[in-house]
Amino acid sequence: MRLNESCVIVTGASSGIGKALVEHLLIQGAIVVGIDRDEPLIRSDHFTSIIADLSRQEEVRSSYAQAKAILGRVDLYIANAGQARYGYDTQMTETDTEILWNLNVMAVVEASRLMREDHGNQPYHVLAISSAIAKLPLPGYAFYASTKAAVSAYIRGLRFELPSNQRLHLVYPVATLTGFFNVSGQTHRSWFAQTPQHVAESIVKGLQANRLDIYPSFLFHSLITLFPFALRLYQHREWLVLKQFSAQRSTRQVDGS
């Protein structure tokens, strides 16, 4: 894909992978609209921000319409916005599950439908951020993993329904060093971790090479493909950490601290 002068929407643009992606796309000469609940601290003549809560379907649609009015056309929609909650699945509230499903899954589905309706049989690209956890579910993130697996399955299935000039890309990042874990509640560091700048650079290179599946971590891709049994040790380690985390949280709640 040629990014120079392409018109791009990036969701979750105020921080983390989204912000790094905007910066890399601008370097490549793209014209970008960023959508987020917070105002992105990015200053460029080729960047405009829109404030929206993408866990609400009507705001996915209205923000797309606003972005198209600004850009004139949308060549690439990057569905990056997402959240997680860390802990036992029984500790997830109904509000938690609703927000995660709507933001992580239904916002991607709605965006892909909007692009299809808007373009008909004309070419376009949609890139959805899945996760390594879609392929390696971890204790503490059972529901989050299900949302990312749903995105992966949806995009992979939808590829068969579209003309060859309409490209759907998936990205499988490992743990990324952003504010993600502050929101989810995880306090320990993951074994696999990369910077948002590295992930963004991998995505840009993947788009330019027209790769449909993008793995920013060569190590993870190699292990999950060739030695998946080795990653069971990582799952077991995360299970032990989750038990310790939950026990400490229960103690704090009993103590009232």
Image (tube, rainbow, N blue to C red):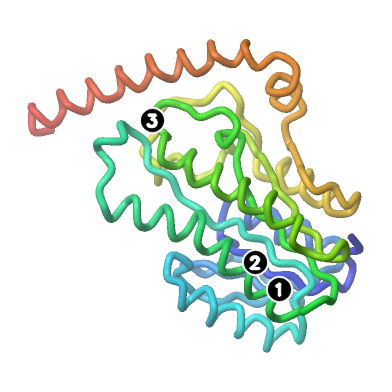
Residue 242 x, y percent position in the rendering: 35, 22
Q: CA distance from mark 3 to mark 1?
A: 35 Å
Q: Which is more toward the observer, 4 or 65?
A: 65
Q: What residue lies at 90% left-to-right and 68% top-to-bottom?
A: 4
Residue 122 x, y percent position in the rendering: 84, 76
Q: What residue lies at 82% left-to-right and 69% top-to-bottom?
A: 30
Q: Amino acid at mark 3?
A: Gly
Res. 221 image quadrant: top right
Label disc, if present, on residue 126 of the rendered structure: none
Circles 1 and 2 in contact, beta carbons < 8 Å: yes
Left or right of 16 in this view: 21: right
Q: CA distance from mark 2 to mark 3?
A: 29 Å
Residue topped by disc 1? 116
Instruction: Please say if 93 is above or below 50.
Output: above
Residue topped by disc 2? 112
Q: What residue lies at 71% left-to-right and 19% top-to-bottom?
A: 223
- Secondary structure at badge 1 equals helix
Q: Within 10 angstroms of label 2, few (less than 14), some, or many (20 or more) residues?
A: many
Say whether disc 2 or disc 3 marks the residue closer to the N-terminus.
2
Q: Amino acid at mark 1?
A: Arg
- Secondary structure at badge 2 equals helix
Residue topped by disc 3? 140
Q: Within 10 angstroms of label 1, few (less than 14), some, or many (20 or more) residues?
A: some
